Amino acid sequence: MAIVQISQIQLRRGMHQDLPQLASAELGWSLDTQQLFIGNGTLAENAPAEGLTEILTENSDIGSFLRSYQFKGTDSGYTSQTGVDTSHPIIRGIQSALDEAVISARHFGAIGDGTTDDTAALTRFIKEVYRYTLNSSTPQVRRTIKLPAGTFKITDALPLPPNLTLVGDGKNNSNIVATSGSVFYSCDSLYQTSSLMGTNGAALPGNVTISDLSVSTLAGSSSVIPVDSVAELTVSRVGIIGPSTVTTLVGVAATMATSSSLTFNNCTFIGGIGGIGFSGTTKIVHVNDSKFVNQTTYGIDNNSYITGLVDSNNYYDNVPTPIRTLSGNSLSYGSTTSNTAVDFSGVYSGSAKYGTGRTVVYGTAGNTISGLGTSTITTLANGAGYIDYQITTGSNFRFGTFKYNNSGSVVAFDDDYTEPASSIGANLFANSTGVLSCTVTGASTLKYNIKQFV
């Protein structure tokens, strides 16, 4: 381009609201906003539009200039073809592209410093993403929402509408702490609760996923997570914490519908009278690879409401009754307690218990029972059962099947066993009240399992 004229550069300056139309190539500086502009020139000078053009500086709002987004994928070594051919790529608005990224609670004003009351911000966060007018009919609004690392204090419970997916930055990193009462409450798609759920055309609670965070309450007796009339709830890698006054950390009810398909996977339940309790008809509950700590009464309470409880590979630490009133077609497999040296609690199917396996070592310091003589093994439950056992003393052994029938006041038993020609001085027997004991005269190992109806 040929230079047609060189003249003194003219610069105007003043408040942004007073910035005039600048002449062609004339500069204007807004003192208050620290923005620099140049005049476009006139249409007669072949300018595409009359007006002002901002010259980018360190004070410019770069984001406001972003108009479109095209996926490139160049990290893989080439540019991806997003359209029907390379000449027609898919171009999207930058706003819609960014909206598909993580929706963080901080986008809605939540602070997470452990001091600020984030109740209003977190409630707005959930309700605006899962807008009640669209939640039931428009899948596009059902986005995963993110609770970033931090401690978010709340003074009132947060809603769990249908189709919600809430993800944190980790069980120890993203924390919601209620000063008292519950952290969440179940609601339908219109955010109605209790006996109103499902009325006015609303969808009942369901399809809720919570993962990778911790929730706790500091005071009160209300459940940390009360679940009511929910179908399809998945809680994964979540810490659920409450004081000893909390009736149950997770309380399941069925006010308007049967709660069903509840999964708790790799969770930690700390405190409370109970870990998970039920007060309404519930179908299909899976609790897997989780830890229950310091419940004062029970870990899981069936309470005769559950059809299909599966308790698998869970650990109960300082919990008096890990599973209370297991019945029906429920199943417990591989659960352990901390106060037993070696305890694989076997398999329960309904009221039948199979394959309890334990090991007791006698006569060697540091093992389960260091002394010899007679020691109590367990107290047999009322009913009939079998005990398969093996006692080894050095290279000698005794093995057999102990059959019993315990009526509560008397025990009839028959021990069918095999041992070497010379006795190893060991015996397994039960008294009239069902106390099962073992007698050994030398360093020995007892291995046994119980098959019984309980």
Image (cartoon, rainbow, N blue to C red):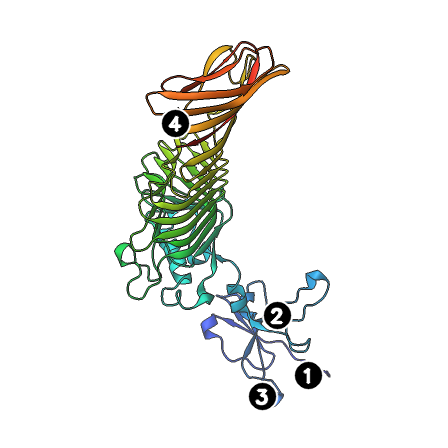
Residue occupying the point 56% across, 84% down: 49
Identity of the residue furthest to the bottom in this view: 44
Between the residue at mark 1 and the residue at mark 3, the CA separation in whole angstroms equals 19 Å
Residue occupying the point 59% across, 17% down: 397
Query: Taking 154 as reference, is 99 left or right?
Result: right
The quadrant where residue 22 appears: bottom right
Which of 253/46 is in front? Answer: 253
Q: What element carries label 3?
A: helix
Residue occupied by mark 4: 381
Between the residue at mark 1 and the residue at mark 4, the CA separation in whole angstroms equals 106 Å
Residue occupied by mark 3: 43
Q: Where is residue 453? Give x, y as percent.
A: 41, 33
Q: Can you say whether 12 is above or below 395 in the image?
A: below
Which of 60/95 is in front? Answer: 95
Residue occupied by mark 2: 70
Q: Earlier in the sequence, mark 1 or mark 4?
A: 1
Q: Where is residue 352? Give x, y as percent.
A: 43, 36
Q: Is mark 2 on a helix, strand or loop?
A: loop
Q: Which amino acid does label 1 sit on?
A: Gln
Residues at badges 4 and 3 in contact (C-beta under 8 Å)? no
Q: Earlier in the sequence, mark 4 or mark 2?
A: 2
Q: Which of marks 3 and 2 is nearer the N terminus?
A: 3
Q: Considering the image in quadrants, where does the C terminus appear?
A: top left
Residue occupied by mark 1: 5
Q: Where is residue 325? Give x, y as percent.
A: 36, 37
